[in-house]
Amino acid sequence: MSNNVNMYGYVAASNPYFAKSLLHKYGYVVDKEQPLGMALQQLVAYEGEPVLMEIVENNPDKELFMEYFDKKFPRKKEDCGCEKESVKLIDYMNFSGQMQAAQVADNKKLTTETSVVVLAGAVLIAFAIILKK
């Protein structure tokens, strides 16, 4: 049997209280015989990226990884954010390419149309009930 430790086992061994609280947060009950690392790995398999990000945020070596990443992939001068660039319009667009304000106006119109249809349906049903009696 090998003594390989993956990220989940390492995080669980270094901070078992975090591992138990994360499992509890997502409604998982850990069997006393099941290793916490394996339970975390299964939790990520079921719940996906949000859980993985929480585990990465609580990795005891997170700062080491960040330092290595900064050395391996240094930022270019224009990427540092220190120079004030004009705000690009695309930064305020959503996935569909619409501006936030335009989407809000569309949502209000859709809400109004839906309300009118529901009200008309309620009036029609009420009228049908009255005529039936």
Image: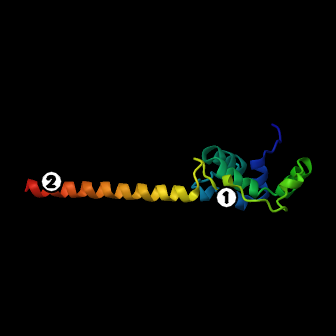
**Side of 108 where 36 appears, left or right:** right
Residue 14: x %, y % from top left? 79, 57
Sequence order check, earlier mark of 1 and 2 = 1
Residue 2: x %, y % from top left? 82, 38
Of badges 1 and 2, the one in the foreground is: 2
In the displayed structure, 5 sits above or below 62; it is above
**Side of 120 where 133 appears, left or right:** left
Q: Is residue 33 visible to the viewer in this orientation of the structure? A: no
Which residue is farthest right? 71
Disc 2 packing (10 Å; few <14; some 14–19; many ≥20)? few
**Side of 108 where 120 appears, left or right:** left
Residue 36: x %, y % from top left? 70, 51
Q: Which mark is residue 80?
A: none
Image point 71% across, 60% down: which residue? 18
Out of 27 and 106, give the one closest to the viewer: 106
What's the CA distance linking mark 1 and mark 2? Answer: 58 Å
Out of 129 and 76, give the one closest to the viewer: 76
Disc 1 packing (10 Å; few <14; some 14–19; many ≥20)? some
Pointer 2 residue = 128
Q: Amino acid at mark 2?
A: Ala
Q: Secondary structure at mark 1?
A: helix
Pointer 1 residue = 20
Out of 26 and 34, give the one closest to the viewer: 26
